[in-house]
Image (spheres, grey):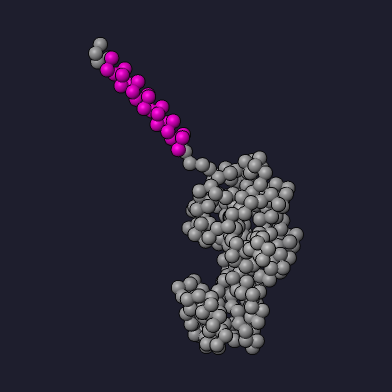
Amino acid sequence: MPYRSLKTREVLSFIGLTLLLLGLSGAIQPSHAAELAEIEQRGYLIVGVKDNLRPLGFTNEAGELEGLEIDLAHWLAERILGDAEAVVFQPLANQERLSALLEDEVDLVVARLTFTTSRSRLVDFSQPYYFDGTALITQNSSLQRLSDLRHQPIAVLHDSDTIATVRFQIPTARLVGVGSYEEAKALLETGQAVAFAADASVLTGWVQEYPSYRLLPVLLSAEALAVGLPRGLQYDSLRRQVNRAIEQWRTEGRLQERVQHWGLPSVGVPSQIEGNWEEPER
């Protein structure tokens, strides 16, 4: 009997401990990103954007957000919720874009987020809405094509991916490293460089701020900009809605019109979506 009594106490203790742990695990269970039904019930989208990257997403003189990606966020709200204004913007620094999705701070990220294989292991991506990439700006009217830049000094940011791209596309160019966009501008102004290579989206903003510069009509590389979404099968309905909205935006010509409106190179508009964007890749 003593043995039986002891065993009973142990069983009861085990059951109590198990229930306690289950209760605690439920109490500390991490929150999850909003699924489509939750967003529809809530009545608005929460979208992570840039607020300092003209012309993709920036704050204008009136203190309002605008840009190509802001337009896209409004379009997604219209398509998903029937109201283009049903969107709350959350400005994000580059290093916050993935964590904002992973930590359930936003529903979507539309903030010059490029698709990469390593990122796709953490978050999901929509079909691309724009192809950004390395471009060149210059004040020199005689420079019209890449061949004109042979043996010419081109400014590039130190340790940037642009260096390898320019070396591949224009192998005889003389690259001049700079530590900032301001330093690059100084070299261009003094003639120590005839062009500056960087992301087309960034250089478009530069041209808009300094109209004496112009973009050469060619991209040296292409990086797919896509909407970032939470990863998981439970978010497939949301991802499908986003993809269909982007595809409609493109096929109806609205994307082309907004790209032209914001002065971005039209060569970056996806002309044909390849692959099956309706089924998640796992």
Q: Residue furthest left?
A: 2
Residue at point 59%, 65% (across, down): 52
Q: Position of residue 24 (x, y in %)?
A: 42, 33
Whether residue 8 is visible to the viewer of this picture, yes or no, is yes
Q: Quadrant of residue 188?
A: bottom right
Q: Residue furthest top?
A: 1
Q: Position of residue 97 (x, y in %)?
A: 53, 57
Q: Nearer the viewer, residue 273 or 245?
A: 245
Q: Position of residue 205 (x, y in %)?
A: 62, 71
How many numbered discs sit on the rendered protein? Answer: 0
Q: Quadrant of residue 19?
A: top left
**Residue 15 is inside the magenta segment:** yes
Q: Is residue 152 left or right of residue 36?
A: left
Q: Nearer the viewer, residue 134 or 280?
A: 134
Whether residue 125 is visible to the viewer of this picture, yes or no, is no
Q: Is residue 68 above or below residue 84?
A: below
Q: Is residue 156 left or right of residue 277?
A: left
Q: Which residues are magenta?
A: 5-28
Q: Residue furthest front?
A: 62
Q: Residue furthest right?
A: 252
Q: Nearer the viewer, residue 198 or 151?
A: 198
Q: Position of residue 149 (x, y in %)?
A: 57, 85
Q: Quadrant of the N terminus?
A: top left
Q: Is residue 144 left or right of residue 92?
A: right
Residue at point 57%, 66% (across, down): 223
Q: Is residue 25 left or right of residue 46?
A: left
Secondary structure mostly taken by the magenta-highlighted segment of the chain: helix
Residue at point 24%, 13% (across, down): 2
Residue at point 59%, 86% (across, down): 148
**Residue 86 is inside the magenta segment:** no
